[in-house]
């Protein structure tokens, strides 16, 4: 990707990324994406009838009932989304009015998101509760149970994609205004989600890189990381060519104030270190330390990806600003000639 | 005279679609060449809407380019296709055809999500840190204070249909000329 010298006027005056959505929204986007991604992967694992090679069925006794926790490591995504949603409420000017946020689903993606996330949280938590509770009627073999599972799975995908669509819907920021952004966030949600499942099985006592389903999951997660890297490249290169402010955003991310977040947070933590550590871990079967460190770094990388994309959003230039730029340049030329 | 350019674009689009404004509505028109950058408009706007003489809570912002002596009072353009209305999750940001077709924000419905601020290409709606909601120009309910108090008459409140298209054309010819110079 070739870069041009930074325009002095544009750089000084217009490289002003949006300041409305900051870290709190990044945390919300991240938790929603990661939770939804892990639930989607977990449901797929469930549907395929794959066992996680657990040495025992973890359970706890509560009020005389034995709660089966064996499916919790793969179905806890809705809890993450439920934790993330209050961050969105925290960012509102008047927090108690959050219930109003579903009044305009016809055109507003915030309102649609409110509905998508609510449905996902309700169905996801219900399915998690179903897997935990010991009542026999809940575990009866019936094709009807597939219906809530399919709904939750669909809305998990919806939630993961929505985090990108929310940004895309604000049309005046060229960096966000592309279908590649929802795709990027979806792939990132699936990779961080699958890594979250891998990490949540670490404490079960029989973690091994070669252990059946986990081996497949690790392989799939690495493929997702590679796909995420490709989509990120496509996203940045397309945005660089898309508009002047898109170019500015990419420059800000790669070489400007955000370069530490991009190169350190996204590239190193999110891509390079996890891939290296997971490959090292494959040389030491049974040693979970490398997987653990790589996984944590990958999760941080997912967060920095959202943070970087949010912070690098620069608005389209309005015609008056363009006119000023031209006037300023003409004046500068005249001054130089004198 | 420099009219808010995007508004012009939107007007053009509107006429292409064969639709016209139904009633005699008024719009704010800014003559950038008259503006001295005194920011009195910001002051009176904040006094009218908040009771405090605090320009940071004004609905009008004067963009200043001291290097070239350029001052431009920026207010909401009440765009025909208003992104702020589209993205508002609560319908707090809505159009009022009966009030000069203005785009207004209902403070009782606004949750302060600031999506409208991000969506607006002009960066116009502002977040009022005191009221914790988004606010924007509402033409002061038909009597814009910025127009009333502007000493040099840089801002006027005129009928949309009477707004001089020739002057708009002149502004854009100037713009086109400047573009040629750059090329």
Image (tube, coloured by chain):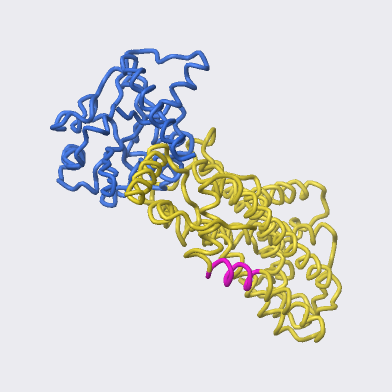
Chain colours: A yellow, B blue
Quarter residue A197 falls in: bottom right
Residue A6 in the image: state x and y as whole percent: 48, 57
Q: Nearer the viewer, residue A298 or A272?
A: A272
State whether residue A296 is above or below residue A326. below
Question: Is residue A133 in view from this perspective?
Answer: no
Say which residue appears at 73% left-offset and 66% top-offset: A71
The majority secondary structure of the magenta stretch comes to: helix
Q: Is residue A267 magenta?
A: yes
Q: Residue at x 21, y 46 (%)?
A: B55
From the viewer's perspective, is residue B33 above or below residue A116? above
Q: Is residue A30 left or right of residue B43?
A: right
Residue range in magenta is A260-270
Q: Is residue A3 magenta?
A: no
- Residue B9 picture location, percent across and down: 45, 26
Marks counted in the figure total 0
Residue toward you, A154 or A18 = A18
| Left or right of B93, for residue A256 | right
* Residue A95 coordinates in the image, percent (x, y): 38, 52
Can you tell which quarter of the image residue A106 is in?
A: top right
- Residue at figure coordinates x 20%, y 33% from the top left: B146
Rendered-image quadrant of the N terminus of chain A: bottom right
Residue A300 visible in the current orientation: yes
Q: Dividing the picture into quarters, in which one does residue A243 lie?
A: top right
Viewer-nearest residue: A89 or A268: A268
Tell which residue pokes out farthest to the front in this image: A338
Note whether B129 is above or below B48 in the view shown.
below
Question: What's the residue at 73%, 73% (across, down)?
Answer: A275
Residue B102 rendering spot, x and y as whole percentages: 34, 26
């Amino acid at each position: 990707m070739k870069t041009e010298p930074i325009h002095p006027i544009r750089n000084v005056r217009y490289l002003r990324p949006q300041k409305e959505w900051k870290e709190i929204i990044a945390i919300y986007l991240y938790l929603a994406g990661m939770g939804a991604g892990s639930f989607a992967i977990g449901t797929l694992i469930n549907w395929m009838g794959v066992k996680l090679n657990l040495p025992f069925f973890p359970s706890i006794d509560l009020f005389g009932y034995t709660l089966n926790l064996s499916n919790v490591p793969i179905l806890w995504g809705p809890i993450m989304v439920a934790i993330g949603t209050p961050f969105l409420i925290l960012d509102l000017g008047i927090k108690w009015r959050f219930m109003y946020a579903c009044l305009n689903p016809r055109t507003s993606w915030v309102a649609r998101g409110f509905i998508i996330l609510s449905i996902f949280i309700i169905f996801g938590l219900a399915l998690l509760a179903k897997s935990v509770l010991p009542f026999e009627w809940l575990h009866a073999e019936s094709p009807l149970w597939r219906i809530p599972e399919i709904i939750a799975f669909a809305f998990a995908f919806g939630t993961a994609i929505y985090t990108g669509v929310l940004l895309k819907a604000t049309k005046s920021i060229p960096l966000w205004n592309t279908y590649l952004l929802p795709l990027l966030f979806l792939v990132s949600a699936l990779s961080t989600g699958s890594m979250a499942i891998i990490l949540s099985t670490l404490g079960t006592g029989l973690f091994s890189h070669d252990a059946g389903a986990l081996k497949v999951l690790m392989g799939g997660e690495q493929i997702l990381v590679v796909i995420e890297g490709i989509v990120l490249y496509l996203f940045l290169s397309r945005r660089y060519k898309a508009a002047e402010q898109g170019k500015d955003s990419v420059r800000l991310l790669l070489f400007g104030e955000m370069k530490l977040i991009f190169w350190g947070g996204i590239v190193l933590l999110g891509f390079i270190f996890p891939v290296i550590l997971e490959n090292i871990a494959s040389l030491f079967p049974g040693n979970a330390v490398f997987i653990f460190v790589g996984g944590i770094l990958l999760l941080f990388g997912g967060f920095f990806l959202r943070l970087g994309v949010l912070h690098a959003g620069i608005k389209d230039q309005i015609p008056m600003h363009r006119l000023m730029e031209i006037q300023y340049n003409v004046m500068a030329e005249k001054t130089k000639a004198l | 005279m420099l009219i808010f350019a995007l508004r012009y674009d939107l007007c053009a689009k509107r006429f292409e679609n064969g639709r016209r404004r139904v009633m005699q509505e008024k719009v704010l028109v800014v003559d950038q060449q008259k503006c001295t950058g005194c920011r009195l408009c910001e002051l009176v706007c904040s006094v009218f809407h908040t009771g405090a003489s605090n320009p940071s809570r004004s609905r009008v912002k004067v963009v200043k380019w001291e290097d070239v002596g350029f001052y431009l009072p920026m207010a909401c353009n009440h765009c025909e296709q208003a992104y702020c209305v589209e993205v508002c999750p609560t319908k707090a940001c809505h159009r009022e055809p009966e009030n000069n077709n203005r785009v207004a924000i209902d403070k009782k419905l606004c949750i302060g999500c600031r999506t409208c601020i991000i969506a607006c290409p002009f960066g116009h709606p502002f977040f009022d840190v005191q009221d914790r909601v988004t606010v924007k120009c509402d033409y002061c309910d038909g009597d814009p204070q910025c127009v009333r108090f502007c000493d040099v008459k840089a801002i006027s409140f005129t009928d949309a249909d009477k707004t001089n298209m020739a002057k708009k054309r002149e502004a854009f010819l100037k713009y086109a000329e400047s573009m040629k110079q750059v090329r």
